[in-house]
Amino acid sequence: MSIIASALIIAGLFFFFVGTIGILRFPDFFTRAHAAGKCDSLAAILVMVGIAVFNLAEPSLAALLVSIKILFIAVFVFIVSPTATHALTEAALLRGVKPWEKEKKRS
Amino acid sequence: MERLFLAVGIALVLLMFLSLYRVIAGPSILDRILGANVIGTKTTILLLIIGLLFDNVGMYVDIAVAYAMLNFITTLGAAKYFLRRKSVHLEDSP
């Protein structure tokens, strides 16, 4: 039980790390939004499911209730985080932020 | 297991400081909102881990629920505001 929880939490931390590097290094708002969306939904859900599994190591009614609440946060984040990213990207696109392009080759 | 949670919490705080660079020095307003959104999600996770470290998850889970909802409302409201407000220039002209 605790091995599964550790693996999930460490995988989530890896995705947080990669997403933060993407937010820092990408050249454009849209690419940064792509990295932030991964960091928000996937990594957060992995860590939350890991914590919920670890919380059930000693099963009781109170622990079950707390785990259900944590899974509720995971479902909420899974619905809400793509919505927030989509709203930001829509605002950027409708206000005319231009996507990044590769620099043209010298002739 | 306690050591793992402590290490994950410290790593999350360091990653939040790295994301704070995008909030402070972001070239446009939407970049700042995006960085704040990512910091809010990390704070939700950090609240759960603080609850595990203090052996009191039942209290901190409720705070995490409230923080996740607040983070979503903040981002959506700011995005709608800057979508409507035409006088603010989102993109820096080079």
Image: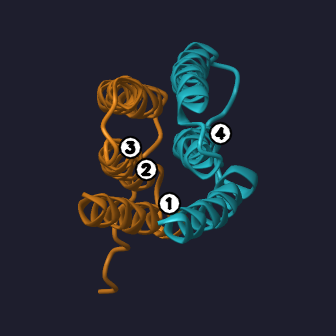
Chain colours: A orange, B cyan
User: Is the residue A90 above or below the residue A105 in the image?
Assistant: above
Per the image, label 3 sits on a secondary structure element best described as: helix
Give the structural element (helix, strand or loop) at label 2.
helix
Lower sequence index among marks 2 and 1: 1
The residue nearer to you, when weighing B4 against A60, is: A60
The answer to whether residue A37 of the structure is visible from this angle is yes
Q: Position of residue B27 (x, y in %)?
A: 65, 53
For disc 3, the marked residue is A55
Which sits in the foreground, A6 or B23? A6
Amino acid identity at mark 4: Ile
Q: CA distance from mark 2 to mark 1?
A: 6 Å
Residue annotated with mark 1: A23
Q: CA distance from mark 4 to mark 2?
A: 15 Å
Q: Quadrant of residue A55?
A: top left
Instruction: Tell me how far mark 3 sits from mark 1, CA to CA.
Output: 31 Å
Residue marked by disc 2? A36
- Give the residue pinned by disc 4: B29
Q: Are marks 4 and 2 in contact (CB under 8 Å)?
A: no
Instruction: Inspect the image, locate mark 2, and give the three-letter code of the amino acid beneath it.
Output: Ala
**Mark 4 or 3, closer to the camera:** 3
- The chain identifier of the residue carrying mark 2 reads A
In this view of the protein, which residue sits in the foreground, B86 or A59? A59
